Amino acid sequence: MQPLDLLIAGGRLVTPGGLVAADLGIRDGRIAAIGALDGQAAAERLDARGLHVLPGVIDSQVHFREPGLEHKEDLASGSDAAVLGGVTTVFEMPNTSPATIDAQALDDKLKRASGRMRCDHAFYVGATAENVGQLAELERRPGSAGIKIFMGSSTGSLLVEDDASLERVLRAGSRRVAVHAEDEPRLRARKALAEAAGDPVAHPEWRDVEAATLAVTRLLRAARAAGRRVHVLHVTSAEEIELLAQARDVASVEVTPHHLTMQAPDCYQRLGTRAQMNPPVRDARHREALWQAVTEGVVDVLGSDHAPHTLDEKAKPYPASPSGMTGVQTLLPVMLDHVAQGRLSLERLVDLTGHGPQRIFQLAGKGRIMRGYDADLVLVDLEARWRIEAGWLASRAGWSPYEGMTITGRPVATLVRGRIVARDGALVGDPMGRPVRFLETLGG
């Protein structure tokens, strides 16, 4: 039998069939064998005794800020943070400077990523009223994660706010469209509330639940009219969950660790503008509704919405302070702590971070521990109790809302296509990330 390149021995694997105590063999970057492999020759051996082996996390919402905003993040530093946290694939968002709205900008990002990103990657193309005629072609280009719609202004200038433009965008193409669903007219009408308050505790009052539900209602109507599948990003409220649970024919759902972990008003009182993000962290009623949606299967995907800003930028008086916080490196550790606290099973976490993204976005050969799939893996110690410190963070922004938090569960090693890229909190080897493939663009 042909020797393996790497044998991961003695771990507990989280597979689509459940938790399995087995060895895992890797050859040519892919999973070649699962089972008792003690007698199998291998060029390298990795001892996984006492550890769990999960599919590498697919984080389908990150903002790595390059080009134009590299002072707070770039593709290299963002991907360093990703692999240190167990993330092996990222979908990067289009609100850079210039925005990713045409083939030239998409190709520029792919060129910038080559030889600099440690994780595999794809890039969203932002929809505008002006580029709608190009979207069907842009979503099928190699390296494209598909189309992203901003219904409400967040960071950057991309905006599709009226129903006519929204439906035109949804009719232009066939892949699932990712959507930031906040109602822009309501946000504009209510901004004076934030300006009068001058305090981030008012953020969920300005960007209120009605701004979210208005947008989701409009989006679902347009999606059904256009016959287009949509993916609603960073859902934050009980009311949105109720709408989306009745729309499984056209809509899939993402939530973030931030909205599952923090609650208002505590987070704003403790962190100030560092807790400010769009859509906002809401009160305990909404957080519990999100957890119930995780339990009931309404939530398909966990995304970090990694959106770094410098501390100087965050120190601006509210609401001039920018919205967004880091999260790609802490997504898995924070969620492992929720597993330790009994809020969800390890298998459900893997469904949200691996199986779910693969299924929703039709990724080729990613997100599952199965023979023939890419050997994108993260080895985790479920018993490790540790403290998140600034020195561990790789983001150029240099901070996390979870600094000082003591949690249980830690990534020990990360592999991208069979190569160890991070181990024991340190980066390993040279960057070798490459664009991911999608079944929908391969004719599958």
Image: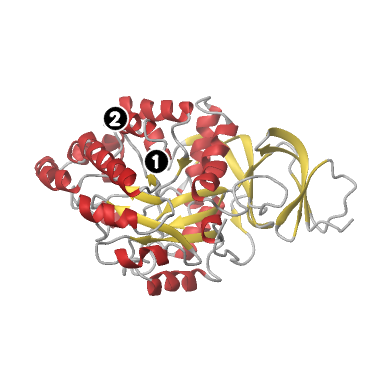
Q: Residue 87 at x, y = what percent?
A: 54, 50
Q: Which mark is residue 251?
A: 1
| Image quadrant assignment for residue 442 | bottom right
18 displayed left or right of 323: right
**Foreground pick, 45 / 367:** 367
Question: Decide: marks 2, 1 in contact (CB < 8 A)?
Answer: no
Question: Dot 1: what SS?
Answer: strand
Q: Count how many numbered circles sit on residues in the image.
A: 2
Q: Which comes sooner in the sequence, label 2 or label 1? A: 2
Q: Residue visible at 37% across and 35% down? A: 247
Q: Residue 187 at x, y = what percent?
A: 17, 45
Residue under numbered circle 2:
239
Name the amino acid, label 1.
Ala
Does residue 9 show up?
no
Does residue 60 show up?
yes
Question: Dot 2: what SS?
Answer: helix
279 displayed left or right of 421: left
Q: Which mark is residue 322?
A: none
Quadrant into which the N terminus falls: bottom right
Q: Bin the neighbour count of mark 1 within 10 Å (Cα to Cα): few under 14, some 14-19, many 20 and up.
A: many
